[in-house]
Structures are given as structure tokens and as C-alpha cells.
Image (tube, helix red, strand yellow):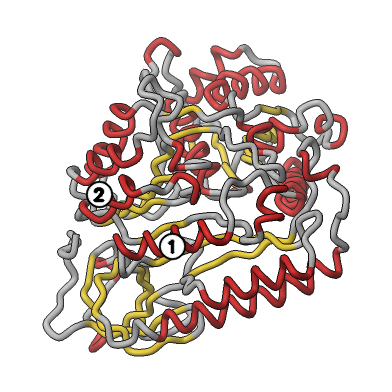
């Protein structure tokens, strides 16, 4: 991103991909309103941090980033520091007194107000009239702004996220998201298809569907039923290289969805399903509706429809009341479930959630021990899955020359999501791969597994293609 306008904005995004999409639309609205965008915080007159307020570590990270960027008021050109997003939505009353360095606060439902609020704050800061500042920056009059805000992609040009719903109505006992983001609000299917078509035209090869719970998509719309299978079938017609489904709650995965994933040519055989635990007692306290038996039945059903499916999950250790027997059951499951990727979190109490006041809170030292044990078991299980891929042919999306492994390109297949999973390192035989081929597809053979990653070589005669021939 770059610009020449007088009022330049540096935008920093904390947290998850859903927050990233919010930032992309916010940046589009700012550019439409006449602001410039810069990647250099020292060159920005306005600095915005889109904060995360999900767990304690994320909250602390957002606060530390705000304090770090506040120094630009003395060290750079910064006139205003603004905070947006989940942390603001959750602690709007407390934050201004705690962080006087921040000049402007906007929650998750106020991104569309950001341009106007910034112009007003700049006018007050400079003593000039708002209209004069807007004219200097080349802003468009408000009546000429597009009906839908422009979107500035922050991802590489070949990958983008499509946020299909906002909020969540699941009410897990440990989660503050419904308090922050509100209940489930699905985007109209026609609007999603139009946005996807624009992204396809822009050259996006991999479209990742996200929401707090993608499997709930459509339950709040007039049809009052999950519409994710229909959405996948419609998106499949657009001809992306890959359609990837993220944040698929296990309770919402049924045979209709699995059939759609099987039948659609471009849908990745990849499921990100947050299981959290397998002990029935722990899951009940979490307000989750499954138990170990039903989870194992679900995994069997997934592999009936998608035998080659890659499975990612998240587990939580140290939830209130988790006994050693509960944890041993989780360890046993993790060793046997043949999971490809997994994240492990230590439970942290969140204000205004039922779990925060539950009895039998687990001591931190026990949480840490369980975290280390489970992480080790999952790493071994995932390594075995990758070893089994050695010798297989894969279509991969070329991302960039590797700085970590000279002579190789970093790539991903349908079995690896951006940012969170391992990589495939493709040997650049005779220097045939160049930066011009970033975002292209190449057929490779997995030659070796190393930790979370695979090493691969191009298949004989394979050439980079701009369209995924496997799709």
C-alpha cells in the first residue's frame, strides 16, 4: 500500500482472520473517504490499531501495541492514535482512563464511522475546519461514496478471506465472543457470492470461508436452516483454485455438508473443527453438545466422505474441574485420532463468562504441565501423518522463495491453511521457479517430512499454472 495524500494512515491488525477482514473493509472506507495508506508508521499522521479482546494474552498484546505506537506522537508524524475492535467493544468504559494516549475509540459495530470520526478529531486537533482538511486530502464528498465500502486486501494477492457471518449464538461457557460480537448474524448469500466474484476477478486463487462458527451460517436467515452446503455449491461454480472452510464447529457438521465438500471440485478436503476436549464431563461444563463417542463417530463419518481429509482442531487444557482422568482421556484420544494439525490452549478465565466463576479452578502449574504433555503427543501424531504423505503427488500453491531454506519455494496444498499450518518446501530445480510464478499452481512429489513441514520436488514435466488443474 502506498499513497501521496496529505493525511496518511498506518493500520495495525491484532488477532484473528475475522479481525483482518474488518480491517480490510475499514481501510477501504478510509481510502474512499480520501485518506492515504502507508506501511510506514513513522510517516503516518493517523495510527489505528484494530485490537483483539478474546483472551488475556491477546488483550495484553493489544494494549502493549497501543502503548508502543503512542510513542510515534513524539518520534514520528502521528497526530492521532485510534483504537478499534474487540478490546474496545468489551472495555469501552474502562479503557479511556487507563490509556489516555489513545485519542479515539470505536467498537466492532462502528468501523463505518471511522472516516468521519477521524476527520472530526483531526479538525479539532488542528483547529481547522473539517471541510478544509478534507479538501487538502482530496476526499470525496460523503454523498459520492460507494454504497458498499471498498476493500483493501491485506493478504497476499492469491489468498483472501470471505467472512460469511458475524457473532455467535453457541454460548460456550468459556467464551466471551457473544458478549463482544453479539449473536449470529449471517450475510445474505447473494451478497457473499457478489463479493466472492469480485475477489475471483481480482486474481484470488484461494478463498477461505470464516465466521465464528461457519457451520451455523444461515440459521438466523429467513430459511432458518444451515445454508453452508448451498453456499459451497454456489461458490464452487466460480472456479477458484481452492475453497477452504475454517472454524467449522463439530456439532454443525452433517452428511449434507460433507456431501457438498465431496462433490464440489474446488472445496479443500480440509476441516478446521474446534473440539476443545473429549471428556463428557468437561464438555458438559463447557456447554458443548458432544462427547468422545459422538466425536469419534463424526471423525469416522468425515473420512467416509473425504478419505484424504486433513483435520485441524483446538484443545483446551485446565478447564475448571478437569481431573487427571479427564486429561488422560484427552491424551489417549489425541494419540489415536490421526489429527494433522492442532492448537493447544491453557484455559484462562474471561470476565462475564460462566466458566470464570466455576469451582475447582485448575492451578497454573498443572495447566502448564498438561499443555506440554498434550502438545508433545499431538506433535508426534501429526508427524506420523506427514510421514505418510511422502511419495504422494500434490498440487501446491507457490507462495514465495524461502528465506529459511535457501534454494526452495514455500508452498501449500489443500491440506494446509494459511498462517496456522506447516509448509511444503519445493526444491527450485535449476532455478526454474521465479517470483513471477508466485500465486501459481505446481504439481510436486513429497520427498521427505521434517517436523511440521514437507520437502518436495516438482513432478517430471510439471510447469507452474495459474489455475489449479486438480480443482
Residue sticking out furthest to the left: 461
Q: Return the residue nearer the eye: 77 or 279.
A: 279
Mark 2: secondary structure? loop
Q: Which residue is depicted at the point 57% across and 33% down? A: 169
Q: Disc number at residue 299? A: 1
Residue projecting furthest to the front: 293
Crowding near the residue tagged with mark 2, few <14, some 14–19, many ≥20 C-alpha atoms within 10 Å: some
Q: Horizontal and vertical percent for residue 217?
A: 42, 35
Residue 114 occupies quadrant = top right
Q: Is mark 1 on a helix, strand or loop?
A: helix
Q: How far apart are marks 2 and 1 (CA)?
A: 34 Å
User: Who's the residue at 35% across and 71% down the image?
Assistant: 411
Q: Where is residue 100 in the image (x, y as percent from the top left)?
A: 83, 33
Q: Residue at x 25, y 56 (%)?
A: 262
* Label placed on residue 266: none
Residue 35 x, y percent position in the rendering: 50, 30
Is residue 234 toward the left or the right of residue 300 in the image? left
Q: Can residue 47 be seen in this view?
A: no
Q: Quadrant of residue 398?
A: bottom left
Circle 2 residue: 203
Image quarter where the C terminus lies is: bottom left
Q: Nearer the viewer, residue 468 or 34?
A: 468
The 10 Å Cα crowd at callout 1, few under 14, some 14 to 19, many 20 or more, is: some
Amino acid at each position: 500500500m502506498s499513497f501521496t495524500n496529505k493525511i496518511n494512515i498506518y493500520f495495525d491488525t491484532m488477532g484473528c482472520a475475522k479481525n483482518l477482514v474488518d480491517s480490510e473493509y475499514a481501510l477501504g472506507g478510509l481510502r474512499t473517504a480520501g485518506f492515504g495508506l502507508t506501511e510506514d508508521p513513522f510517516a503516518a499522521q493517523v495510527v489505528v490499531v484494530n485490537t483483539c479482546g478474546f483472551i488475556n494474552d491477546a488483550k495484553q498484546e493489544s494494549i502493549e501495541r497501543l502503548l508502543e505506537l503512542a510513542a510515534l506522537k513524539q518520534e514520528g508524524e502521528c497526530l492521532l492514535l485510534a483504537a478499534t475492535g474487540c478490546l474496545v467493544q468489551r472495555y469501552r468504559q474502562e479503557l479511556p482512563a487507563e490509556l489516555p494516549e489513545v485519542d479515539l475509540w470505536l467498537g466492532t459495530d462502528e468501523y463505518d464511522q471511522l472516516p468521519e470520526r477521524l476527520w472530526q478529531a483531526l479538525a479539532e486537533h488542528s483547529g481547522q475546519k473539517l471541510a478544509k482538511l478534507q479538501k487538502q486530502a482530496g476526499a470525496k464528498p460523503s454523498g459520492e461514496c460507494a454504497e458498499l465500502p471498498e476493500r483493501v486486501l491485506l493478504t497476499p494477492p492469491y489468498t483472501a478471506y470471505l467472512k460469511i457471518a458475524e457473532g455467535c449464538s453457541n454460548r460456550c461457557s468459556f467464551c466471551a465472543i457473544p458478549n463482544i460480537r453479539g449473536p449470529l448474524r449471517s450475510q445474505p448469500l447473494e451478497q457473499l457470492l457478489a463479493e466472492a466474484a469480485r475477489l475471483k476477478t481480482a486474481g484470488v486463487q484461494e478463498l477461505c470461508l470464516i465466521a465464528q462458527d461457519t457451520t451455523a451460517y444461515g440459521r438466523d436467515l429467513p430459511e432458518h436452516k444451515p445454508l453452508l452446503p448451498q453456499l459451497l455449491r454456489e461458490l464452487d461454480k466460480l472456479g477458484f483454485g481452492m475453497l477452504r472452510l475454517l472454524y467449522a464447529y463439530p456439532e454443525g457438521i452433517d452428511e449434507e455438508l460433507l456431501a457438498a465438500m465431496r462433490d464440489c471440485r474446488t472445496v479443500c478436503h480440509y476441516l478446521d473443527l474446534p473440539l476443545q476436549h473429549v471428556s463428557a464431563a468437561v464438555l458438559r461444563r463447557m456447554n458443548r453438545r458432544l462427547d468422545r463417542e459422538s466425536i469419534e463417530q463424526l471423525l469416522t463419518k468425515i473420512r467416509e466422505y473425504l478419505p484424504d481429509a486433513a483435520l485441524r482442531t483446538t484443545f483446551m487444557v485446565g478447564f475448571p474441574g478437569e481431573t487427571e482422568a479427564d486429561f488422560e482421556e484427552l491424551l489417549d484420544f489425541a494419540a489415536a485420532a490421526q489429527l494433522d494439525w492442532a492448537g493447544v490452549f491453557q484455559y484462562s478465565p474471561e470476565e462475564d463468562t460462566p466458566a470464570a466463576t466455576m469451582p475447582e479452578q485448575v492451578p497454573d502449574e498443572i495447566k502448564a504441565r498438561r499443555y506440554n504433555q498434550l502438545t508433545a503427543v499431538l506433535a508426534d501424531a501429526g508427524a506420523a501423518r506427514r510421514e505418510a504423505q511422502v511419495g504422494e503427488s500434490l498440487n501446491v500453491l507457490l507462495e514465495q522463495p524461502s528465506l529459511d531454506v535457501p534454494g526452495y519455494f514455500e508452498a501449500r496444498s489443500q491440506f494446509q491453511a494459511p498462517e496456522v499450518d506447516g509448509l511444503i518446501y519445493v526444491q527450485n530445480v535449476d532455478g526454474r521457479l521465479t517470483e513471477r510464478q508466485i500465486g501459481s499452481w505446481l504439481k510436486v512429489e513429497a520427498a521427505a517430512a521434517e517436523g511440521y513441514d514437507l520437502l518436495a520436488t516438482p513432478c517430471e514435466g510439471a510447469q507452474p499454472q495459474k489455475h489449479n488443474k486438480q480443482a
